[in-house]
Amino acid sequence: MSSFLVVFCSCADEQEALRVAKVLVEERLAACVNVLPRAQSVYRWEGEIKVESEYLLLIKTTEERFSSLRDRITELHSYEIPEILAIPVWGGSDKYLAWIQASI
């Protein structure tokens, strides 16, 4: 079985978040994408502190699909530098992990 990842990606608005999520699942780069609304992000950009509402994607995938997923998010995303952070999954339900593998 593959090594599994949860990938974080923030989007500017709900429309973009849903569009990116659907493409990733349709193209089998992700088994599931949760879209969490209205995350408040505080960050430094071009020398200024910004505070923005964003939509957070929690993307379930495998290490094997990560580079393609990362490249596809970069193509689809409106941000100059989109957040793409992969966190390894150290465990989980065997049935759920098997479903992720089968779904991608």
Image: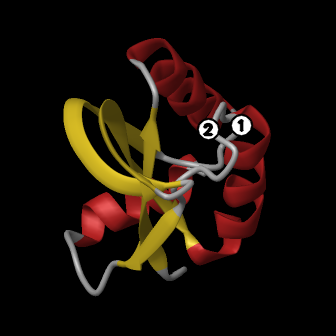
Identify whether 55 is placed above or below 3.
above
- Circle 2 — which element? helix
- Percent of width and height locating residue 104: 61, 51
> Can you tell which quarter of the image residue 92 is in?
bottom left
Residue pictured at 62% horizontal, 38% vertical: 24
> Hey, what amino acid is under mark 2?
Leu
Left-right relation of 40 to 60: left
Residue pictured at 53% horizontal, 21% vertical: 16
The residue wearing badge 2 is: 24
> Can you tell which quarter of the image residue 46 is in?
bottom right
Asked if the residues shown at circle 1 and circle 2 are in contact, with their CB atoms under 8 angstroms apart, the answer is yes
Residue pictured at 27% horizontal, 62% vertical: 95
Toward the viewer: 64 or 47?
Answer: 47
Identify whether 71 is placed above or below 34.
below
- Percent of width and height locating residue 99: 40, 54
> Hey, what amino acid is under mark 1?
Glu
Identify whether 74 is placed above or below 52.
below
- Percent of width and height locating residue 76: 72, 33
